[in-house]
Image (cartoon, coloured by chain):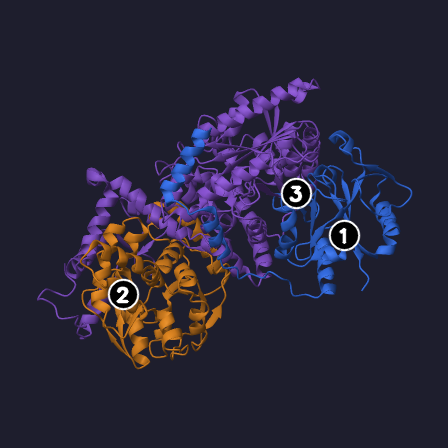
Chain colours: A orange, B purple, C blue
Amino acid sequence: MRIALFITCYNDTLFPETGVAVVRVLERLGHEVVFPAGQTCCGQMHWNSGYQEEALPLLPRFVRQFRDAEAVVVPSSSCVAMMREHYPMMAKRLEQRGGHDGLAAEVARLLERVWEFSELLTKRLGVTEVGAYFPQRVTCHASCHGLRSLGLGDGPKSLLRAVRGLELVEIANEERCCGFGGTFAIKNAAVSGAMLEEKMADVLATGAAVCTATDNSCLMHIDGGLHRRRSAVRTMHLAEILASTERVGDAGVREEAVR
Amino acid sequence: MSAATELERRGERGARGGLDPRTAPAFPVAAARALGDAQLRRNLHHATEVIQAKRARVVGEMPDWQALRDAGEAIRRHTMEHLDRYLEQFEERCVRAGGVVHWARDAAEARGIVVRLVEDAAAREGQRGEDSSAANEVLKIKSMTTEEIQLNPALEAAGFRVYETDLAELIIQLGHDQPSHIVVPALHKNRQQIRELFRREMNLPELGESPEELAEAARRFLRERFLRVPIAVSGANFLIAETGGVCVVESEGNGRMCLTLPRTLITVAGIDKVVPRFRDLEVLLQTLPRSATGERMNPYNSIWTGVRAGDGPEQFHVVLLDNGRTEVLADAEARQTLHCIRCGACQNACPVYRETGGHAYGSVYAGPIGAILTPQLQHMEHAQSLPFASSLCGACYEVCPVKINIPEVLIHLRNRVVKRRTAGLRVVGDPEAWAMRTASTIFRSERRFRAAQRMGRMAERLWERKDKAGEQWVTSLPGPLGGWTATRDLRAMPKETFREWWERRGKKTAQADAGNGTEVGDE
Amino acid sequence: MSEARAVVLERIVKAKGASGSLSEVEQMWERMPRGYRVAGERDRASVLELFEDRLRDYDATVVRCTAARVAETLRSVLVAAGVRRVGVPERIDLALPEGFEFVTDEGMPAAELNEMDGVLTRCGLAIAETGTLVLQSAAGQGRRALTLVPDVHVCVVRARDVVETVPEAFARLAATATLPTTFVSGPSATADIEMTRIKGVHGPRFLHVVLVEDYG
């Protein structure tokens, strides 16, 4: 398949290694990855923080850039949730204002082909074994959008279980929010910090060396907290673990990519 | 709790001592303060975990739980769509059965009606010529609605002694405190705190601290009043339009006492409490107890219709309260807020509430439902920080027995708050709005986006420091972004973005539809 | 007040549009989907077993007997409950055992009710799944205060009056929906002190159920 990658604004800027990993995994599975030009942001930050007007123009851009894709992969469950939950209504609103005839129908057609990375693998491609090797003790946090909006269920963990050498440990309170919440992390920093304390305690209690998830937003927050505590536990996006093979070793793709 | 903190808390609570959204501090401020109370947090963690576990167990027993939620949602939605008809029907049937129905546009009007009714009742009691010691006393069953309208201070100002009869409300009342949870209002107190309170206020210096002893002390203290006081004020869980009946759901028996022993009963109920038919309770009385306290059925439900000779009060009044509910109804995207059946499950599930408790929300309606109901009841003029008091995790939506999509309503209300704040020229002085608009402009063009990434990388370098492992991190950010680094570090920005890596790798970016000469995606 | 009524109703209509007539609205109510369980699936023996289990979960005691042995069963239950002065509703229609002082409630004041050691009533309907007794102000069940004030409640339930599910109960109650009705599921309790469920803040702390089985 020819799979178009929507990297997302924050992955592009802060977690390019996740994108690199996605490309690696999909190519290893025999697919071609393309990167549609012009892509920037899905509009989630604006939409969720009350700036709906400012989010609206980002929808037609996305549609124009990805409308011809056979499949679209997005390494961020919150961005896919944004699209599934809000793009249809946003498209209708734009149509009502004029100048976007047929946008709602296009969006409906396009969304059928948009997948978060782990669900592209498990649901669209029907695979859990992707040739990965990662000999570490790993725990997986269930990002809220992935869990509740996308219903990823056991998908991410099923992928991890198929990774050679990987020891998956369950985390207590797996479904409890880590406290990132977008602008919430800044506007309600104290509460966000308190929620982070709880999540870190649960992560550390697993004895895992690595905490993973489908969203770098959660991981950035957990990583930042663990580093502040001088913990040696690292965070890695699910894609990077799946990209890891004997060749690259247990450091995953991070070192190779960009730092 | 230190005296200083106690004073602070009283100060937060408005002139009358009630949790008042008009004067409460913004959520981030109140929450930060609450986070400093370790005892509160321990109580909250314990309480919410216990109720959540109980809920999970009894919900797990129900193979048709989702169907019940669907039916509950349908019933509530249908009710709001025809609220006028159903209120009219309720009034007609209740009056036909001997009740008296009053309407109140707002809290002040409701207070006035209730005070007048209590005064009338007291005068009648005085004329009976019996022992008049109880003539200026009023029993109360827990009712969020009566707290919302701040009824107790009004009754007290009119010369009446009000006795709260729910154990938790009694604890709150004796402690001059405020409820922090819809269903378990004294959730923020542990047994030692309660014992101290009872020892002092009930004059029981030898009182032990086991929950059984505390409950026994409350039982004796209140029983004497149940048998004597002839006037009671209650709320209602449901008003049944078809029959004109009222349903009260409770655990302790104080509701039954107040609903049947006094000669005069006054029930205050929001107009959103109405359900169409008696049969609809078969859904709600399955989902409410399981959601609220994790029980298959709560100990007592009372359903009565008007007045019945020989059984219960001789005079029964219902005060139907608007107080902003019609405004919630008017916002089609937020209307589902009114579907709430006040189970409190959202509070128990909320990871934010778990850390801050209810007082931080500055309203008797706290937690997720409070975050959407309170600002709307305030016509969006107050409590504007509440829609932002959420990480949008969706745990509330998952447990709501009537499927209120709270995250959806939160997002909608955030938009309303922003639009209010940035209407007209005010955006010029609003740094957040300016930043958001700038970000939007940047996102609308890949060229601008890449430029912003480069500039961001350059600026951020000023804040980078190498840690012991030799990695570059930012541990302190300026201005509002400092909220991040208050509790977390931030990895330095990578030297190369993904798209730069992609280009370096030599792949061409996919061609979009035939352009008109400009770079694809630019506007 | 009627001005407030007019204003509130007007606000409602303005907020969401006018409704059709009541009969149109009622038709829409009929069309609402109800995919939840209505009828139970257990056989009678299992329903009664479930009922007993649930009652015991709530710390109520349950004793079964046949119709012929009600009086003697009541005697042992009342003895075990330690009561002597027992309030009963008018027309209870039960064979009462000797050795107790049964006081018929003809509207005695609350203070007098408080002097009773316990109360004995029938019950018109019970729900097995939730361990609930449904009491209405009807023959043999008494007014609400009667089953509220005394500390001990002994309740006689006929097996044929036990349904499995809550919807089944509501179907049976439809005809008497306007009578004062109380759902009793175990003795009163509170969970307000550290979430510990404690028995009996108010209302009877001790509930004893006598389940009278039918023949065949």
The chain letter for the residue carrying disc 3 is: C
The chain letter under disc 2 is: A
Q: Nearer the viewer, residue B244 or B393?
A: B244
Judge if badges 3 and 2 mark residues of a common chain: no
Question: Circle 3 — which element?
Answer: loop
Position of residue C178 relative to residue B469, above or below, is above
Q: Amino acid at mark 3?
A: Leu
Q: Residue A105 has which mark?
A: 2
The residue shown at (23%, 47%) is B435
Q: Chain of mark 1?
A: C
For discs 3 and 2, the disc positioned in front in the rendered view: 3
CA gap, disc 2 and disc 1: 61 Å
Label 1: few (<14), some or many (≥20) within 10 Å? many
Residue lying furthest left in this view? B517
- C-alpha gap between disc 3 and disc 2: 55 Å
Q: Element under label 1?
A: strand
Mark 3 Cα shell of 10 Å, populated few (<14), some (14-19), many (≥20): many
Q: How many marks?
A: 3
The residue type indicated by label 2 comes to: Ala
Res C157 label: 1
Mark carried by residue C179:
3
Q: Is residue B425 left or right of residue C197?
A: left
